[in-house]
Image: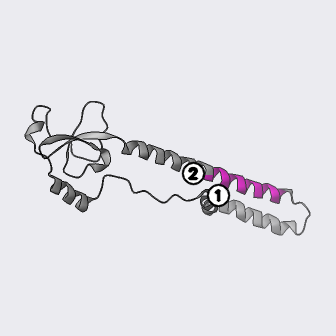
Amino acid sequence: MLSSKNYMSVHGLSAEEVERSRKEHGENTLPHKKKRGFFRQFLSNFGDPLIKILLAALCVNVVMLIKTADWYESVGIAVAVFLATFVSTLSEYGSEAAFEKMQAEAEQIHCRVIRDGALANIPIGEIVVGDFVLLERGERVPADGIL
């Protein structure tokens, strides 16, 4: 919308307009979800369809175990269920930790905007709808916007 030569002719948002935009459209941040503990996440992973199939196979095998004394398969299935659930939980837990770290790093990024006719350097989370964000080559676009 603006070339580098005429950006100072734009006044940008006033402090009141920034507050109004923030109240109307919300903040430029992702909502923080409450982190589940490892054990709670482990238990919720038993709802996975593959784990349910393995648990059903375990139940059938235990019923069949009554007629025979061959308990090795039942133990094998139980170990497979436990390992699959544990590995899945570790993977999810690690992914969530990596995402939180990436989100914390993103919150440290600053960008240049025009507000009240002046150039301001603000954190990315303080950008609101209607801000004029000045970008240079190689910079990340700090939000959804019109270019």
Q: On screen, 5 above or below 105? A: above
Instruction: Classify residue 84 as left or right of residue 76.
Output: left
Q: Nearer the viewer, residue 58 or 32?
A: 32
Pinpoint residue 114: horizontal percent, then vertical percent. Answer: 17, 43
Q: On screen, 6 above or below 18? A: above
Pinpoint residue 146: horizontal percent, then vertical percent. Answer: 21, 45
Q: On screen, 136 above or below 124? A: above
| The magenta stretch spans residue 81 | yes
Q: Residue at x 37, y 42 (%)?
A: 108
Q: Residues within 10 Å of mark 2 (few under 14, many from 20)?
A: some
* Residue 93 badge: 2
Determine the main secondary structure of the stretch shown in magenta. helix
For the C terminus, the quadrant is top left
Q: Residue at x 35, y 52 (%)?
A: 29
* Residue 72 badge: none
Q: Earlier in the sequence, mark 1 or mark 2?
A: 1
Q: Nearer the viewer, residue 146 or 26?
A: 26
Residue at the right extreme?
69
Three-letter code for the amino acid on which mark 1 is drawn: Leu
Q: What separation in Å lies between label 1 and label 2 (alpha carbons)?
A: 19 Å
Three-letter code for the amino acid on which mark 2 is drawn: Tyr
| The magenta stretch spans residue 28 | no
Q: Secondary structure at mark 2?
A: helix
Q: Residue at x 28, y 50 (%)?
A: 126
Q: Secondary structure at mark 1?
A: helix
Q: Residues within 10 Å of mark 1 (few under 14, many from 20)?
A: few
Residue range highlighted in magenta: 73-89
* Residue 50 badge: 1
Pinpoint residue 68: horizontal percent, then vertical percent. Answer: 91, 65
Q: Quadrant of residue 19?
A: bottom left
Closest to the camera, between mark 1 and mark 2, is 2
Q: Residue at x 89, y 60 (%)?
A: 70
